[in-house]
Amino acid sequence: MTTYTKGCLIKRATVARDINAGDFRLIALTPLANGPNWDLTFQLKTAQIGDVMSFVQATTSIQMFTDVSAPASSSILVGPVTEGAPGQINATFVNIAQTPAITGNKWKLQFNNLQVVGKGGQTITVPQVTVLVDSPF
């Protein structure tokens, strides 16, 4: 919803179309050894300047692609994922094998049906948020 006041456009509330990947930042934490493989945790946080105040949950799934051009995901967390909310959403993928094919390239995380709280205090479901991150390996 927007209103005009003395020729200025003032945003009263955030709507779903206002939210995009620029409203988020993704942090890859240091991988933890799990036998011969690794557990990887990513934190989806809000950008300092953006339309998102906090998180509710990723309701459907979070998919990890170990190559941005890969047609299929490498690992899937089935939702609802609420760990870390409201400050962030933590996505931990366990038992990931470190191979030369996934080391040193860009990865893609796709948060499906992400529920966030907008600047106006309303809960908004964003169908898909895709964020790129450097390989943690």
Image (tube, rainbow, N blue to C red):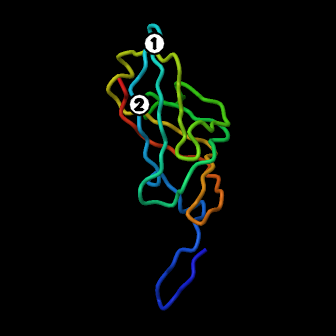
Q: Residue furthest left?
A: 104
Rendered image quadrant of residue 84: top right
Q: Nearer the viewer, residue 93 or 30?
A: 30
Residue 37 numbered tag: 1
Q: Quadrant of the N terminus?
A: bottom right
Q: Spot the residue most to the bottom.
A: 6
Front position in the image: 52 or 68: 52
Above or below residue 51? Residue 107 is: above
Residue 57 is situated, as x and y percent measured from the top left of the image, at 63, 43
- Check the image and report above or below for 118 versus 33: below
Work out whether residue 71 or residue 113 is closer to the camera in this orientation and state it. 113
Q: Amino acid at mark 2?
A: Leu
Q: Which residue is mark 2?
A: 29
Who's the residue at 58% across and 47% down the image?
Answer: 86
SS class, disc 1: strand
Residue pictured at 46% horizontal, 8% vertical: 35
Q: Of the two numbered discs 2 and 1 on the same chain, state the one appearing first in sequence.
A: 2
Secondary-structure class at tag 2: loop
Q: How far is disc 2 from disc 1 in space, using C-alphas?
A: 15 Å
**Quadrant that contains the C terminus:** top left
Occupied quadrant, residue 124: bottom right
Crowding at mark 1 (Cα within 10 Å: few <14, some 14-19, many 20+):
some
Point out the residue furthest to the top here.
36
- Which one is closest to the eye, mark 2 or mark 1? 2
In the rendered image, residue 27, in percent from the top left (x then y), is placed at 41, 38
